[in-house]
């Protein structure tokens, strides 16, 4: 038997760049795509040969009308979780944090935006990456930097 016969099947991967957007009041922005229930960090798929920060800038402009300076984004790390809207897929996210004081307008496939206190869930249905990974990571980083 070969090694591949003993290996588990490879997960179907969705590579994204996403952001923890923090407003002047400390709340974070979550988005919900049209026809879905789960709120998640804004961002989107990374195109072939595209740098994650450039994918993030492109997606934020397309989906929220938000123009960012990529140099002002701080890299948080690489995080994975089951995809919220694609059963059997795993999201691999390059995450950034950005402080913004601009208005956002849902566009493209974004149907709704919500600002929430990152210490809670805002009473919203959250995507696994947001609920299980990003918000806990962000809360821990707030506690350790306080």
Image (tube, helix red, strand yellow):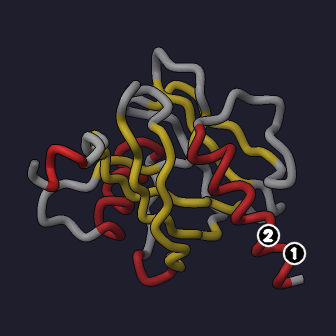
What element does badge 1 sit on? helix
- Residue 124 appears left or right of 58: right
- Residue 63 appears left or right of 79: left
Which dot marks residue 140? 2
- Image quarter of residue 87: top left
Please report the residue visible at 61 percent of the width from the left and 50 percent of the height from the top: 103
Which dot marks residue 20? none
What element does badge 2 sit on? helix
- Residue 133 appears left or right of 146: left
Callout 1–callout 2 Cβ contact below 8 Å: yes
The residue closer to the viewer here, 91 or 45, is 91
Which dot marks residue 143? 1
Location of residue 11 with respect to 36 vertically, above or below: below
The residue closer to the viewer here, 60 or 9, is 9
Location of residue 64 with respect to 39 vertically, above or below: below
Please report the residue visible at 60 percent of the width from the left and 60 percent of the height from the top: 20
Question: x, y (%) of residue 43?
Answer: 43, 50
């Amino acid at each position: 038997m070969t090694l591949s016969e003993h290996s588990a099947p490879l997960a179907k991967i969705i590579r994204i760049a996403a952001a923890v957007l923090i407003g002047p009041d400390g709340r974070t922005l979550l988005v919900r795509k049209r026809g879905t229930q789960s709120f998640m960090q804004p961002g989107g798929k990374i195109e072939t040969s595209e740098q994650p920060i450039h994918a993030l800038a492109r997606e934020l402009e397309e989906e929220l009308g938000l123009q960012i300076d990529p140099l002002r984004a701080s890299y948080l790390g690489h995080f994975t979780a089951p995809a919220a809207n694609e059963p059997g897929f795993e999201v691999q996210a390059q995450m950034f944090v950005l402080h913004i004081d601009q208005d956002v307008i849902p566009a493209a496939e974004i149907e709704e935006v919500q600002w929430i206190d990152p210490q809670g869930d805002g009473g919203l249905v959250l995507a696994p990456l947001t609920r299980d990974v990003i918000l806990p990571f962000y809360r821990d980083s707030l506690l350790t930097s306080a």
